[in-house]
C-alpha cells in the first residue's frame, strides 16, 4: 500500500535523527531513497528461501510496487539504477524522485534545484540508459 510505504519511509527518516534538511529537495531525495530501499528489501525478503521464496505467494496486504511492476522487474531497475548512480548521480537522483517518490518532472526539478529543461534532458537520458541496461544486458 502506498500509505504504508510513506509511513515506513517517514519512520526510517525520523529514526535516523536527521532533521536538518538543507531544502525541500534534500528531504525528497532522502524520502525517495528510503522508499526505494523499503521496496527492494521487501522484495528480497519475500524471495529468500528462508521465507519460502521458491513458492509463489498470494499476498493479502502486499506492498504495491511503483507503476505496478513485477518483483523481478523492480529488482532489475534497482540494479540498473545503482549502476546509473555510479555514472551519472544527478540523473539517478531524478529517477528516484520520479519513480519512487512519485514527483512530477516540475516538482523533481524544483527539488533538485535545476531548470525544468535540465530535468527533462536528464530524464530522457536516464530513461534511455536504464532501458538499455535492463533490456539489452
Image (spheres, rainbow, N blue to C red):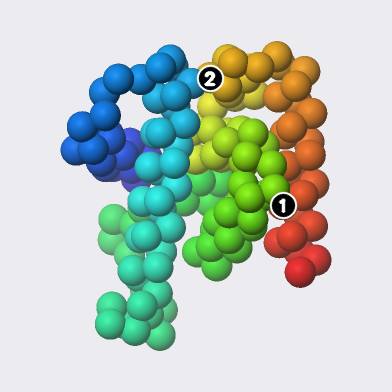
Residue displayed at 34% across by 84% down: 49
Is residue 46 shown left or right of residue 105? left
Tell which of 84 and 99 is nearer to you.
84
Location of the C terminus (image quadrant)? bottom right
Q: Is residue 50 above or below residue 78?
A: below
Q: Secondary structure at mark 2?
A: helix
Count of all numbered marks drawn on residues in the image:
2
Q: Earlier in the sequence, mark 1 or mark 2?
A: 2
Residue 112 circle label: none
| Picture coordinates of residue 64, whole percent (x, y) | 42, 50
Residue matched to label 1: 130
Q: Residues within 10 Å of mark 1 (few under 14, many from 20)?
A: many
Tell which of 2 and 118 is nearer to you.
118
Residue displayed at 62% across by 19% down: 109
Residue displayed at 40% across by 85% down: 54
Q: Secondary structure at mark 1?
A: helix
Location of the N terminus (image quadrant)? top left
Tell which of 133 and 3 is nearer to you.
133
Is residue 133 shown left or right of residue 97? right
Q: Is residue 118 above or below residue 60?
A: above
Q: What is the spatial separation of the Cα atoms under label 1 and label 2, in whole angstroms?
A: 22 Å
Q: Residues within 10 Å of mark 2 (few under 14, many from 20)?
A: some
Residue matched to label 2: 111
Residue displayed at 40% across by 51% down: 37
Give the quarter of the image for residue 42. Answer: bottom left
Is residue 85 shown left or right of residue 10? right
Whether residue 113 can be seen here: yes
Amino acid at each position: 500500500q502506498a500509505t504504508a510505504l510513506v509511513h515506513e519511509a517517514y519512520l526510517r527518516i525520523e529514526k535516523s535523527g536527521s532533521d536538518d534538511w538543507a531544502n525541500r529537495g534534500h528531504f525528497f531525495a532522502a524520502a525517495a531513497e528510503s522508499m526505494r530501499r523499503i521496496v527492494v528489501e521487501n522484495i528480497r525478503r519475500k524471495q529468500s528461501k528462508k521465507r519460502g521464496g521458491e513458492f509463489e505467494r498470494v499476498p493479502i496486504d502486499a506492498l504495491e510496487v511503483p507503476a505496478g511492476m513485477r518483483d523481478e522487474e523492480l529488482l532489475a531497475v534497482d540494479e540498473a539504477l545503482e549502476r546509473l548512480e555510479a555514472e551519472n548521480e544527478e540523473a539517478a537522483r531524478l529517477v528516484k524522485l520520479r519513480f519512487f517518490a512519485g514527483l512530477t518532472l516540475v516538482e523533481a526539478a524544483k527539488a533538485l534545484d535545476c531548470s525544468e529543461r535540465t530535468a527533462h534532458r536528464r530524464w530522457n537520458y536516464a530513461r534511455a540508459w536504464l532501458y538499455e541496461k535492463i533490456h539489452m544486458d
